[in-house]
Image: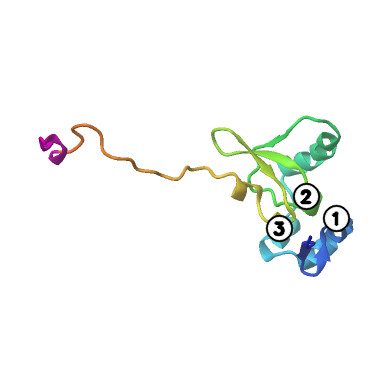
Amino acid sequence: MVEYLFRGKTVEQLKEMPREELLKISNADIRRIFKRGFSEQEKTFLKNLEKRKASKKPIKTHIREMPILPEFVGLTIHVHNGKEFVPVEIKPNMIFHRLGEYALTTKQVKHGSPGLRATRSSGFVPIK
């Protein structure tokens, strides 16, 4: 099995790194989030995350802008998409993306055949 590397670091090394070291290898938008500081909602989410890891309750959140940190790997977080909570299993290749990227808010449109008398041309049905 191939182990996932993020810029030459394994997931275990990323989990042990202090936040300042993570900043140096992260993307620019993630660096801006850390520099600006987390919002109050994000801070409470991180605090509650530690409590919820031990319990069997699902971790639910509305915070779609929260960046996925290395300590989230292996967890299943239920992210709200506007209608329901979508379970998102965090994998190593999701690190430094956002939670909302994996809980889509719109469904793909699949058009079927038109209904009975939907258009003027569908009124004519040839007789065989």
What is the x, y in percent for residue 70? Answer: 79, 54
Tag 3 residue: 93
Mark 2 is on which residue type? Answer: Val
Dot placed on the residue nearer the N-terminal end, 1 or 2: 1
Front-most of residues 40 and 1: 1
Rounded to the nearest whole Å, what is the CA distance between mark 2 and mark 3? Answer: 9 Å
Nearest to N terminus: mark 2 or mark 3: 2
Q: Are marks 1 and 2 in contact (CB under 8 Å)?
A: yes
Where on the picture, by quarter, is residue 92?
Answer: bottom right
- Which range is magenta? 120-128
Left or right, 111 with reference to 42? left
Q: Residue furthest bottom?
A: 8
Query: From the image, which quarter does the N terminus lie in?
Result: bottom right
Q: Amino acid at mark 1?
A: Lys
> Which amino acid lies under the numbered mark 3 shown in the image of this protein?
Asn
- State the predominant SS element of the stretch in magenta: loop
Magenta segment includes 13: no
**SS under mark 2:** loop
Disc 1 to disc 2, how far (Cα)? 9 Å
Give coordinates of residue 50: x percent, y percent: 84, 39
Give the CA distance from mark 1 to mark 3.
14 Å
Q: Pick the quarter of the image with the C terminus.
A: top left
Q: Which residue is tagged 2?
A: 73
Cβ–Cβ under 8 Å for marks 1 and 3: no
Choose the circle earlier in sequence order: 1 or 3.
Answer: 1
Q: Secondary structure at mark 1?
A: helix
Looking at the rendered image, the disc whose residue lies closer to the viewer, 1 or 2, is: 2
The residue identified by callout 1 is: 15
Q: Secondary structure at mark 3?
A: helix
Q: Residues within 10 Å of mark 2 (few under 14, many from 20)?
A: some
